[in-house]
Amino acid sequence: MSDKNLFLIAELPGFTPQIGRLVSMMNYVRSTTLSAVAGLTVDEIDYLHDAQSNSIGALLSHIAAAELGYQAATFDDRDLNAEEKHEWGAAVELGEKARNEIRGHELNYYLGRLEQVRARTLAELGRRDDRWLEVGTTMSSGQRVNNYFKWFHVFSHEVNHRGQIRWLRTRATKRP
Amino acid sequence: MSDKNLFLIAELPGFTPQIGRLVSMMNYVRSTTLSAVAGLTVDEIDYLHDAQSNSIGALLSHIAAAELGYQAATFDDRDLNAEEKHEWGAAVELGEKARNEIRGHELNYYLGRLEQVRARTLAELGRRDDRWLEVGTTMSSGQRVNNYFKWFHVFSHEVNHRGQIRWLRTRATKRP
């Protein structure tokens, strides 16, 4: 993404008009997530505020895992497969499993995973058009949900956890 | 908003096509904020996790205050005036001032403020069109920012704090 356009929700080269606006929002959200974790040490990334807390590293993995899940759902029309569930299970579930399994990694480990997942998202969105965004499926509740909603959900889910990361960062770094 | 369309980001009656999609996102985000605080008591709303924490009530006021600020910026081309700053100052600033001033209110007090501010937002957006969403201003950094970005920022700011509200709710209610 170009910094010049970071504060514009608008068409983007390489994407159809509506997808460009969606990607503008995803790009901005990602830039704020990266700012929220910039410079963190392994100890800060692994910081557990209390017995119920998720670490910043677990939340970063969870953000990438959610995006991977929606890739499978919207690009491949399937759930995560056994291999993906094995690799990403703790990140999907968070909680106890994540506290045990997701720790000891440098920031770059998490950033690499986020970037790797995002690269496929952008490549796939670049191959689709605005009509695809409107395509819907029916939820078990009977409600309709379209692809635009699913990808809106991916970035707003990221913002939700970014809010928690900011809160945790203040406590983990002891620099209010 | 109709529940039937809660999971669709799409055109909405009463709004131009792009504004409809924006309002779809704002509606969904608001529904999740309301779920996040449903049933909270005054003690839970006022819960302070530590000396730096904001209460859930302060965060709800902050969400409404940010929306009010962007109304002034985008609908009225001005900053908050002295009277608004007096009424909303603690909600805008959060921190010590909010811990002292924003407390002792029932949930309905906060929901009423959110609803009152949102009613004007929807009325004003209903009078505007997709070209208005693209209209931009130049930030002090020299970067361009358009109205779509500003309203995207309002709802993603809400999600950021909703993430914190969910985290605090778990601790405030002692029901993990």
Image: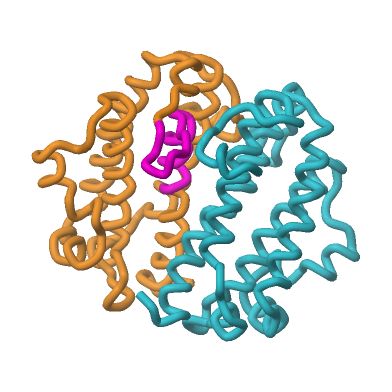
Chain colours: A cyan, B orange
Image: B83 above or below B126: below
Image: A95 above or below A132: below
The furthest residue to the front: B142
Residue B108 percent location from the top left of the image? 24, 46
Which one is nearer the viewer's eye here, A75 or B39?
A: A75
Q: Quick check: A60 left or right of A121?
A: left
Residue at 21%, 47% (x, y): give it.
Answer: B109
Residue A153 shows in the view? no
Residue B113 percent location from the top left of the image? 24, 41
Q: Quick check: B121 left or right of B88?
A: right
Q: Quick check: A51 left or right of B46?
A: right
Image: A19 above or below A53: above
Which one is nearer the viewer's eye here, B63 or A124?
A: A124
Would residue B156 be counted in the magenta stretch? yes
Residue at 79%, 34% (x, y): give it.
Answer: A126
Span shown in magenta = B138-158
Would residue B42 be counted in the magenta stretch? no
Q: How many marks?
A: 0
Residue B21 percent location from the top left of the image? 55, 26
Residue B74 percent location from the top left of the image? 33, 28
Residue at 39%, 67% (x, y): give it.
Answer: B168
Residue A67 shows in the view? yes
Res B79 quadrant in image: top left
Image: B85 above or below A62: above
Residue at 81%, 30% (x, y): give it.
Answer: A128
Q: Quick check: B124 left or right of A120?
A: left
